């Protein structure tokens, strides 16, 4: 039995709990949160994607408000760090220093120095570190990379990504609206697509971004052009300045020489490939969602099973570096080179 702990019982902590509990041979044995009232009422947790609203059954699970005590007593094989971003360095390094394999939510940290410190702690401990870049595991996005890599429809000519959300006013202590704690929408939300751009096209050589302030006053709606190898045009737009009635949307359109691949989470069917000279169709995709698939991947790696390389600590740092370059470009009005 693989024994798992979670620190931070907000929206993402509940999402991780759901995913772990659905796996055979895995048991959440301990949860830590400084707010003990979260253990008494676990229903109604808000977020921009469904899946963490239902109450949790915490029967038989060790409940802690002291992380070091949980690490010392719970005999964990793995832990999920589902805390606000500004806490990631402290708690991820503490987990790794205690010899526990660690899944840390994205972004890995607020700055490169802190992210590299977490990576160094994992290397020193000889333990697994995975960052929660769930879009790499999202079935439609994973299938799209597979199609592109296959070369079946020749090379990519252009790609555009969008990720737009109502203002997330539900976070604990309203930390998302404090750019010094969340990094603004650019680092908390838009990074999903920046990371996917890196995953599919490699690390861009440079970026040019424009941004406006919003609820957090910094980079709450950003549009970026990525200067990648080759002559393809790659852009992404992300933000959380939308009004409450807008809800949440994520989408992309990728133009290849012989097909267009399209996804829109609000559409039915959401995912389709439109080849040159043929009818549009929806490819078969993996079951589950990005959260469940990334956690299954993490657990398999913890258990010593063979898994493909999908996200590495170095790539997590590079995605952080990429978004920080976008913020630099938006602030200066100039191209930022990487």
Image (tube, rainbow, N blue to C red):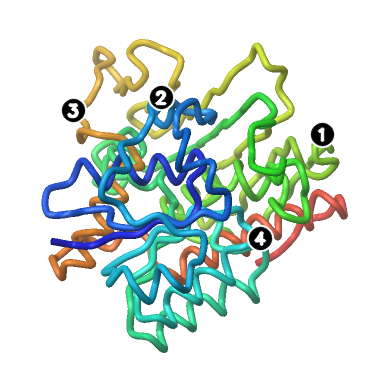
Secondary structure beneath label 3: loop
Among numbered discs 4 and 3, the one appearing first in the sequence? 4
- First along the sequence among labels 1 and 2: 1
Mark carried by residue 214: 1
In this rendering, the count of numbered labels is 4
Cα–Cα span, label 3 and label 2: 14 Å
- Front: mark 3 or 2: 3
Residue 284, disc: 3
Q: Nearer the viewer, residue 141 or 64?
A: 64
Q: Nearer the viewer, mark 4 or mark 1?
A: 4
In the structure shown, which secondary structural element does the residue marked by tag 1 occupy? loop
Front-lying residue, 254 or 310: 310
On screen, residue 282 above or below 34: above
Residue 86 - label: 4
Crowding near pointer 4: few (<14 within 10 Å), some, many (20+)? some
Where residue 93 appears, x then y in whole percent? 50, 76
Q: Which residue is mark 2?
A: 262
Gap in angstroms between the C-alphas marked 1 and 2: 29 Å
Question: Which residue lies at the image location 43% right of the left edge and 21% below the top edge?
Answer: 265
How far separated are the C-alphas under marks 4 and 2?
34 Å
- Residue 185 spot, x, y in % from top left: 68, 42
Quarter in which the N terminus is drawn? bottom left
């Amino acid at each position: 039995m693989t024994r798992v702990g979670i620190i931070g019982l907000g929206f993402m902590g509940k999402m991780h709990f759901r995913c772990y509990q659905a796996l055979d041979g895995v048991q959440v044995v301990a949860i830590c949160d400084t707010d003990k009232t979260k253990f008494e009422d676990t229903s109604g947790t808000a977020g921009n994607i469904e899946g963490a609203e239902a109450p949790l059954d915490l029967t038989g699970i060790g409940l802690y408000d002291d992380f070091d005590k949980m690490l010392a007593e719970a005999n964990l094989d793995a832990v999920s760090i589902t805390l606000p971003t500004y806490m990631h360095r402290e708690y991820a390094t503490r987990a790794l220093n205690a010899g526990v394999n660690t899944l840390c939510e994205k972004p890995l940290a607020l700055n490169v120095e802190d992210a590299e410190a977490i990576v160094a702690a994992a290397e020193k401990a000889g333990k697994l570190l995975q960052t929660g870049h769930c879009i790499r595991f999202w079935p439609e996005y994973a299938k799209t990379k597979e199609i592109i890599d296959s070369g079946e429809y020749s090379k990519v000519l252009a790609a555009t990504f969008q990720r737009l959300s109502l203002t997330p006013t539900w976070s604990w202590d309203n930390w998302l609206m404090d750019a010094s704690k969340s990094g603004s929408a650019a680092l908390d939300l838009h990074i999903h697509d920046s990371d996917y751009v890196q995953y599919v096209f490699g690390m861009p050589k440079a970026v040019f971004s424009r941004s406006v302030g919003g609820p957090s006053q910094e980079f709450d709606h950003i549009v970026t052009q990525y200067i990648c190898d080759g002559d393809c045009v790659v852009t992404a737009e992300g933000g959380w300045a939308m009004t409450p009635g807008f809800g949440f949307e994520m989408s992309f359109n990728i133009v290849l020489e012989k097909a267009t691949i399209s996804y829109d989470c609000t559409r039915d069917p959401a995912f389709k490939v439109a080849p040159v000279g043929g009818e549009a169709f929806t490819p078969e995709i993996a079951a589950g969602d990005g959260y469940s698939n990334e956690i299954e991947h993490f657990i398999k790696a913890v258990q010593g099973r063979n898994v493909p390389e999908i996200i590495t600590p170095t790539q997590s740092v590079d995605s952080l570096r990429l978004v920080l370059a976008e913020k630099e470009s938006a602030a200066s009005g100039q191209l930022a080179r990487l």
